[in-house]
Amino acid sequence: MRMQISPGETVLVILIIIGLIGRSPILATAASMLLVLKLASLERFFPAVERRGMEMGLLFLTIAVLVPFASEKITVKDLIPLFTTLVGVVALTGGALATYLNGKGLEMLRAEPHLIVGLIVGSIIGIVFFRGIPVGPLMAAAITTILLKFIYFVLRFFN
């Protein structure tokens, strides 16, 4: 019978507690699911979750966003103001810019996967101390990419 708690299990329990205290059910649930897999000796699924988890998350997020179209809560008539009003055009621009930046964030995560630790800890800090809402590692990586490019630009400018 196994009685020792591994460092990974300790971190997951801490994340569950932080998620509960910080009122982040997504963080608490994700850490709980991983802890269950670990305690059930199902670590063999970790590589698949790591490799395909983000894609699955994005798939379900996209499905959730498209439900109003499928349920006909949003119709073609509702789309016309997107192209004919300032707010609509700005919303289209914001959506396009966000997806472009997310792509840059994904590139950064692929090039420097170790940065995910900083993104996760930063997200937890934002959830707990600033009452933020986690939007995911892609947007956090995109913002990190922008900040790094700005810092490098400033450093080059002053050197």
Image (tube, helix red, strand yellow):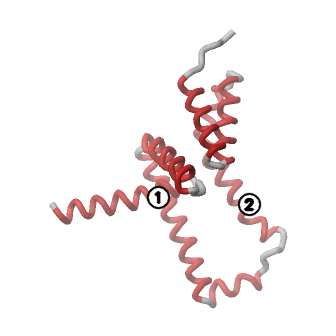
Which mark is first along the chain, 2 or 1? 2
Residue 60: where, in percent of width, then height? 71, 54
Classify mark 1: helix, strand or loop.
Answer: helix
Number of dots carrying numbers: 2
Report the residue at 58% width, 40% height from top: 51
Q: Residue furthest left?
A: 159
Q: Is residue 61 left or right of residue 9?
A: right
Q: Is residue 78 left or right of residue 30?
A: right
Classify mark 2: helix, strand or loop.
Answer: helix
The residue to which callout 1 is attached is: 142
Residue 80: where, in percent of width, then height? 70, 86
Q: Is residue 125 left or right of residue 46?
A: left
Q: Quadrant of the N terminus?
A: top right
Q: Quadrant of the C terminus?
A: bottom left
Q: Is residue 84 above or below residue 91?
A: below
Residue 92: where, in percent of width, then height? 59, 77
Specify few, some or many for label 2: CA neighbours under 10 Å numbering under 14, 14-19, or 20 or more.
Answer: few
The residue to which callout 2 is attached is: 64
Report the residue at 51% width, 45% height from top: 120
Closer to us: 104 or 18: 18
The three-letter code of the residue at mark 2 reads Ala
Q: Quadrant of residue 89?
A: bottom right
Report the residue at 66% width, 30% height from top: 35
Q: Is residue 49 above or below residue 42?
A: below
Residue 116: where, in percent of width, then height? 48, 44
Q: Residue furthest bottom?
A: 84
Specify few, some or many for label 1: CA neighbours under 10 Å numbering under 14, 14-19, or 20 or more.
Answer: many
The three-letter code of the residue at mark 1 reads Ala
